[in-house]
Amino acid sequence: MGKIAFVFSGQGAQYPGMGQSLCEASPAAKFVFELADSLRPGTSSQCFSGTVEELSVTKNTQPCLYCVDLAAAKALEEKGVRADYAAGFSLGEVAAAAFAGIFTDKSGFEFVCRRAEAMQKAAGENPGSMAAVLKLTNEKVEELCGKFTRVWPVNYNCPGQLVVAGESGQLKEFQELVKAEGGRAAPLAVSGGFHSPFMESAASELEDVLANIALGRPRLPVYANFTAKPYSDNAKELLVSQVKSPVRWQETVEALAAQGVDTFLECGPGKTLCGLIKKTVKTARVFQVQDAETLNAALSEII
């Protein structure tokens, strides 16, 4: 077997009940939720019994997802699975950074809470939305975005899938152009235009937050959304930049594959990243780990 990458789920994958069976099955996972509850009381109950509406509010979504992401990775490691590399999609990058030791578990959770608040505030100040564009090349989507002042390509997910963000009125016009070019644009159920210039104020706020957090050197290579390359000594710059800049996920997966990674374990809710990875590297082995059942299924294949 080749090398293993832990990849951490992003916002949009959340669902009621997430993380509960992981918490029950793994002491390492349970510790993540206990720590979160000590810093932000009620976090585990939001994960385990919160409503769809409650979990869709960004200031709740991000801390809850962070916990499930990190708990899944800790449970895998506890069972003897060693990651050679790590990466996370958007919010998942914070969990990846904590898993690798750039953050401590505590400072990572505290940062993700501030990140969630800052991004929710920025979304309120600059109302926007997002849409996934299918069946067009990245170059064509970028060309169409260039016809508007407030529409930007933001998530380079996989071949043939690029998410854009922007002002809702312009985004509606953009979608008509996509249709005219033979593509398809699917609106996303999100509360803002994330990873775009609409998040400039959030990035500025997080720069101040990170100025007061001591970051460590990663114990394994962590690939950044902003560059699709490993962190070096520029963690604060990368964590600030990724909030207002595109997620280069396809490039990240390709870079990991070039390093010999043939097994990807998606840590956290859902299986969105598994799908994107298979569309990018067709020979990759992908596993989701989001609960006790999927943890055991992955372990039976890997160990």
Image: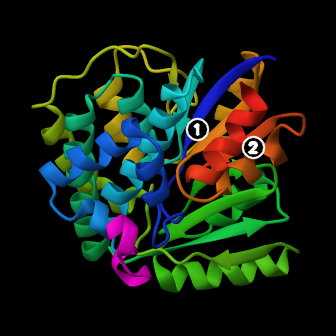
26 falls in the magenta region? no
51 falls in the magenta region? yes
Residue at 34 percent of width and 20 percent of height: 234
Q: Quadrant of the C terminus?
A: top right
Overall secondary structure of the magenta stretch? helix
| Residue 289 point in image, percent of width and height | 61, 46
Residue 146 in sight from this viewpoint: no
Q: Residue furthest left?
A: 212
Q: Count up the numbered dots.
A: 2
Specify start and end residues of the magenta stretch as a single range.
46-56
Residue at 20 percent of width and 39 percent of height: 207
Quarter of image, res 74: top left
| Residue 166 point in image, percent of width and height | 49, 70
Q: Label 1, label 2: how many angstroms apart (C-alpha)?
A: 10 Å
The disc at residue 7 is: 1
Residue at 40 percent of width and 42 percent of height: 29
Element on which disc 2 rests: helix
Question: Mark 2 = which residue?
Answer: 277
